[in-house]
């Protein structure tokens, strides 16, 4: 599925950037690409991310676009599949000839997209994926979100400060899950804690009761988990039904780990989340609410917004969408880029060094600060 996001006049009461529309890509002067999970287990996050992209496009074009031209983002659906995503990136680059692609969400999907783009010397912007394997993708790939080593350091300290010393760790078996397990174990051990049991599960299973039962026998002080999609729903429900919620649960990226789950199964769960905005982005949530009639369902919309504004800044700097010129511009603009999520402060491998996080918990079915 392809979604074209560009600007056309939209009569409404929205302030400032009251433009929205759907069109063929030829009607836009400058087109870049994005690959998101618009269907499948992560569709709700994909839709939230799409809205962040859409809002950025509207506001950029309301201010005159890029190099005096309208900006468009051609969005392809990955359905959460690496195979589908690779087909999508080939279409975007070989048929639509976009010079830059943003996405995806899952690290196991984002990494092959990035590798394909780097091989073809095209710019890739990683919106949401946090596996440390992103560092290996190559010099044309840039991350607007902090990787696992930043997230696990924050989480390990948070868990330790709450008094937990022996924890069981749960994550999907893949690039993302293995990275989170390795980094958290290292950071937690450095503080004096220990991961006494681990569960790297195979995604898509109808039940994880056997694996959860094995972890319960270790009697950890807390369960630390990171999961998403239907697997998160199953894990939250079954852990509740097995009575494991009497032991504290800590979700890394709590929005993702509790998405689409009935409130009774996640009540009281604690965790961390990427902060939606930094000092420069205090108005983003208000603008998003004004545009869509609701707050973002996750933090990822703001990182999508920053991905688009970063791409626009690089295109303006390059003065064109020539791939070589765009890469040179990204090298100049990206390291010091300051967006709604704060300063990227990219390192030599184009990875974010400073990342805002927040401590959260679920109360009455809603995520609140703790």
Image: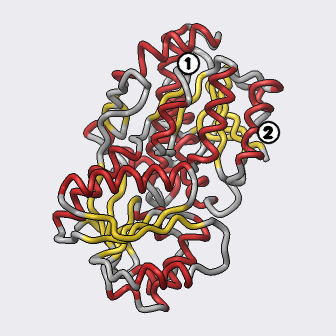
Residue situated in front as seen by the camera: 64 or 259: 259
Q: Going by the image, does 125 lie left or right of 248?
A: right
Quarter holding the C terminus is bottom left
Question: Is 112 displayed left or right of 211 in the figure?
Answer: right
| Residue at the (52%, 31%) spot, across then down | 136
- Would residue 301 be found to the left or right of residue 251 on screen? right
The residue mark sitting in front, 1 or 2, is 2
Please name the residue that numbered disc 1 is placed on: 66
Tell me which residue sits at (37%, 33%) in the image. 352
Q: Earlier in the sequence, mark 1 or mark 2?
A: 1
Q: Nearer the viewer, residue 214 or 267?
A: 214
x then y, percent, for residue 343: 31, 31
Q: Residue at x 42, y 40 (%)?
A: 145
Residue 125, percent from left and from top: 54, 31
Q: Which residue is mark 2?
A: 87
* Label 1 element class: loop
């Amino acid at each position: 599925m392809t979604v074209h996001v560009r600007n056309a006049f939209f009569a409404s009461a929205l302030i400032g950037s009251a433009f929205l529309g759907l069109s063929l890509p030829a009607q836009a002067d400058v087109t870049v690409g994005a690959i998101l999970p618009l269907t499948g287990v992560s569709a709700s996050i994909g839709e939230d991310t799409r809205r962040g992209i859409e809002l950025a496009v509207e506001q950029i074009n309301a201010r005159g676009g890029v190099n005096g031209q309208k900006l468009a983002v051609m969005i392809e659906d990955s359905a959460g599949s690496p195979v589908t995503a690779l087909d999508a990136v080939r279409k975007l680059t070989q048929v639509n000839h976009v010079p830059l692609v943003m996405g995806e969400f899952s690290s196991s999907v984002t990494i092959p997209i990035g590798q394909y783009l780097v091989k073809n010397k095209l710019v890739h912007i990683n919106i949401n994926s946090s596996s440390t394997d992103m560092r290996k993708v190559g010099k044309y790939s840039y991350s607007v979100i902090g990787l696992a080593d930043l997230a696990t350091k924050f989480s390990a300290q948070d868990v330790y400060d709450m008094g937990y010393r022996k924890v069981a760790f749960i994550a999907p078996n893949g690039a993302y899950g293995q990275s989170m397990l390795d980094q958290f174990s290292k950071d937690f051990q450095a503080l004096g804690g220990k991961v006494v049991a681990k569960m790297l599960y195979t995604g898509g299973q109808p039940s994880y009761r056997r694996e959860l039962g094995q972890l319960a026998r270790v009697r950890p002080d807390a369960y630390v988990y990171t999961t998403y999609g239907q697997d998160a729903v199953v894990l939250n429900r079954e852990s509740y039904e097995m009575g494991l919620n009497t032991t504290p649960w800590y979700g890394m990226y709590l929005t993702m780990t509790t998405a689409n789950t009935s409130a009774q199964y996640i009540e009281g769960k604690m965790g961390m989340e990427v902060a939606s905005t930094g000092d420069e982005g205090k108005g983003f949530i208000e603008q998003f609410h004004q545009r869509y009639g609701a707050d973002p369902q996750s933090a990822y919309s703001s990182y999508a917004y920053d991905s688009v504004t970063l791409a626009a800044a690089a295109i303006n700097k390059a003065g064109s969408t020539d791939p070589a010129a765009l890469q040179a511009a990204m090298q100049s603009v990206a390291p010091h880029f300051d967006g709604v999520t704060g300063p990227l402060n990219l390192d030599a491998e184009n990875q974010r060094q400073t990342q805002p996080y927040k401590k959260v918990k679920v109360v009455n079915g809603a995520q609140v600060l703790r």
